[in-house]
Image (tube, coloured by chain):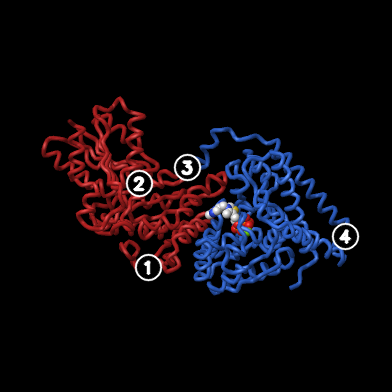
């Protein structure tokens, strides 16, 4: 599959923006500036960027607790995202969701999820609605390797297949569910083999290579949009950070993290593009600069925005209140 | 006025709403065949299989998929087959459906109705008899509806389907075949409006679902002794019509709360708390509750009868409060 130089630059820019956003979150959280807890996808940006770049703007995404990258890649406003993490009323969810329950329906992101595997059956329903409305959209559902061991994973896949729903399931297999190793917790080394149990081909891609992700997801999205039904893609990635920020990771071999860092998806694509002359080092530096400026604005907006008034806690429960 | 069974009234509500709004569709197990209570039988022939979706036995997926459809422009009416099986989808109901509007800061509407065939029916025993409504009243973000007559069932189901918030719609299994008057013309009953099923001056008996009928039987017996009970049916547990209940209690000054659920932590305990907290001065006697005993529903008829509230229990409770 050929991927235009412009598309590749878009993918690089998307990953750079995600990294810039999350590094800010990492530092702000370490400094005690953000309440709650955060799960970062640093190192896994290739999946969010590659998969989302294969979507139309009106397509849907179901995300996870590790979902900042999915939001940024799908076009969510980073200032409102940052304000949400700062727990401000100007945030994407008015300060009611936070990192783990963030959403931006205006760009089709129907929510991170605080419940592992919570998004899969919702995604099937979005696919059902797309089919019923004949809208030609597609729903992309991200989930982790840990989610593949929960029952709703199986129910949702089965439903999507028997009803031929336009849903692309993307498993981000980073080898860990919190402190529990995938190789211990899962009966099979590749989550993708489970797809066969539902009559689907499980495609495995190197998630550290965003072009591979993009290619596989694009093909799946095109097929789903054409009425070909769901698809299943497993992207193998390395989680650079702890499960949550502040996780001492006593359970983990440092060599694994070092290996992941040596396969940085951003460096990989940058080097390739520079080598091919598709993107000069100056252009790449400019992407980084622009991302940093964007995040400066996002942080400033988040910091300077007002906290919600306490009684706003009672709003948004029912439609009649709005 | 013409009479319909509750099953027929519910079916009419579904037909009318599906005719009126192409976004309304049904999703659940065995709906096309109408198993086990007959409400949806024949609807696939009327509206096509695309709008009457039979599912695999996947409760979590039924409810999760309903949510996904609801937040992207459809109006699912899901069916739990037996309310007991909602336990297989508690995450979807409690963590997802009830919370998405709120935790996303009001970004999405959740026009979703979940039909819950509930309560005891002779010998159905532990996994097919429960009255779980209090769990959902205890979950902010859900409406909980529990009609006791065919007309109420129809009017409330129509309103639930047209709303923008999730509704858990409890239908008592013993009432599907009970008939009652249902107006031919369209009636939409607002959520959160109680109905006085029998006026009376001596005691307020508030009851839900099948227990409304038990309370009416008890009221007839009490009337023979000159005690006039007012039977109030809240019809909705959330939102709850406190004003109507309080007006009745102020008038009668005595109250008995009747429900089929296991007693401890049941909805009636909350009703008692509201009365005691807010209109204690209106009372001339302690609040009394009639509810099921705190065990799983047993199978054998004498055991089941012993566990469930009986008409005589309501009569006894009323006699105690009227002194
Ligand atoms: C149903 C459920 N069980 C447990 C948790 C606690 N928890 C949060 S994230 C997580 C690990 C998830 O692993 P995976 O799906 O692989 O995603 P990753 O964190 O690796 O991105 C766990 C156990 C949860 N949020 N939900
Ligand atoms: Mg994982």
Q: How many marks?
A: 4
Disc 1 is placed on an element classified as loop
* Cβ at disc 3 under 8 Å from ligand 1: no
**Mark in front: 1 vs 3:** 1
**Mark in front: 4 vs 2:** 4
Residue hosting label 1:
B32
Residue B177 falls left or right of residue A48: left
Residue B297 falls left or right of residue A253: left
Where is residue A260? Give x, y as percent.
74, 60
* Disc 4 and disc 1 in contact, CB within 8 angstroms: no
Where is residue B214? Give x, y as percent.
21, 47
Q: In which quadrant of the rendered image does the C terminus of chain B lie?
A: top left
Cα distance in 3D space between marks 1 and 2: 27 Å
Where is residue B292? Give x, y as percent.
27, 46
Residue hosting label 2:
B189
**Mark in front: 4 vs 1:** 4
- How crowded pointer 4 is (Cα within 10 Å; few <14, some 14-19, many 20+) is rated as some
Q: Nearer the viewer, residue A176 or A77?
A: A176
Q: Nearer the viewer, residue A242 or A90?
A: A242
Quarter residue A202 falls in = bottom right
The color chain B is rendered in: red
Which chain shows up in blue?
Answer: A
Residue hosting label 3:
A320
Residue hosting label 4:
A280
Quarter residue A217 falls in = bottom right
Check chain identity for marks 4 and 3: say if they share one.
yes
């Amino acid at each position: 599959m050929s991927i235009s130089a412009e598309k590749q630059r878009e993918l690089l820019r998307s990953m750079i923006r995600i990294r810039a956003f999350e590094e800010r979150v990492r530092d702000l959280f370490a400094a005690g500036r953000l309440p709650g807890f955060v799960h970062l996808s640093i190192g896994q940006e290739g999946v969010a960027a590659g998969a989302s770049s294969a979507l139309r703007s009106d397509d849907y995404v179901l995300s996870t607790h590790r979902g900042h990258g999915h939001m940024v890649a799908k076009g969510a406003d980073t200032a409102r995202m940052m304000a949400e993490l700062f727990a401000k009323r100007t945030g994407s969810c008015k300060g009611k969701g936070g990192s783990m329950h963030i959403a931006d329906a205006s760009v089709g992101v129907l929510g991170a999820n605080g419940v592992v595997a919570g998004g899969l059956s919702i995604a099937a329903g979005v696919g059902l609605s797309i089919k019923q409305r004949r809208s030609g959209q597609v729903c992309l559902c991200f989930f982790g390797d840990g989610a593949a061991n929960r029952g709703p994973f199986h129910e949702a896949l089965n439903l999507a297949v028997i009803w031929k729903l336009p849903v692309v399931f993307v498993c981000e297999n980073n080898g860990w569910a919190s402190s529990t190793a995938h190789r211990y917790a899962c009966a099979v080394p590749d989550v993708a083999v489970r797809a066969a149990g539902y009559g689907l081909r499980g495609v495995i891609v190197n998630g550290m290579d965003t072009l591979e992700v993009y290619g596989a997801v694009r093909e799946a999205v095109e097929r789903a949009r054409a009425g070909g039904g769901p698809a299943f893609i497993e992207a193998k990635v390395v989680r650079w950070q702890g499960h949550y920020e502040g996780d001492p990771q006593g359970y983990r071999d440092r060599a694994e993290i070092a290996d992941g860092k040596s396969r940085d998806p951003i460096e990989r694509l940058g080097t390739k593009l520079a080598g091919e002359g598709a993107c000069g080092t100056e252009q790449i530096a400019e992407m980084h600069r622009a991302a940093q400026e964007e995040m400066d604005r996002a942080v400033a907006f988040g910091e300077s925005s007002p906290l919600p008034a306490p009684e706003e806690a009672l709003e948004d429960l029912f439609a009649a209140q709005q | 006025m013409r009479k319909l069974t509750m099953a027929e009234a519910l079916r009419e509500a579904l037909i009318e709403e599906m005719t009126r709004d192409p976004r309304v569709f049904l999703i659940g197990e065995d709906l096309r065949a109408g198993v086990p209570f007959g409400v949806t039988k024949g609807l696939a022939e009327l509206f096509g299989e695309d709008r009457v979706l039979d599912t695999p036995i996947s409760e979590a997926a039924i409810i999760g998929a309903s949510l996904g459809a609801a937040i992207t422009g459809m109006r699912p009416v899901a069916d739990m087959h037996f309310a007991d099986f909602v336990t297989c989808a508690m995450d979807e109901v409690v963590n997802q459906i009830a919370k998405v509007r709120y935790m996303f800061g009001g970004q999405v509407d959740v026009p979703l109705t979940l039909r819950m065939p509930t309560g005891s029916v002779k010998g159905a025993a532990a996994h097919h008899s429960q009255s779980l409504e209090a769990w959902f009243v205890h979950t902010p973000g859900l409406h909980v509806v529990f009609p006791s007559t065919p007309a109420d069932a129809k009017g409330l189901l129509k309103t639930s389907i047209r709303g923008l918030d999730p509704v858990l719609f409890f239908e008592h299994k013993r009432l599907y075949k009970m008939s009652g008057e249902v107006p031919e013309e369209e009636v939409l009953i607002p959520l959160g409006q109680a109905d006085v099923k029998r006026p009376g001056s001596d005691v307020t008996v508030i009851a839900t679902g099948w227990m409304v009928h038990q309370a009416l039987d008890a009221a007839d017996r009490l009337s023979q002794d000159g005690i006039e009970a007012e039977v109030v049916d809240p019809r909705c547990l959330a939102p709850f019509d406190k004003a109507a209940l309080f007006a009745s209690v102020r008038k009668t000054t005595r109250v008995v709360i009747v429900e089929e659920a296991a007693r401890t932590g049941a909805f009636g305990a909350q009703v008692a708390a509201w009365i005691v907290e807010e209109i204690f001065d209106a009372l001339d006697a302690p609040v009394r509750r009639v509810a099921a005993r705190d065990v799983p529903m047993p199978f054998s008829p004498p055991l089941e009868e012993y566990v469930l509230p009986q008409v005589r229990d309501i009569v006894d409770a009323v006699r105690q409060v009227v002194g």
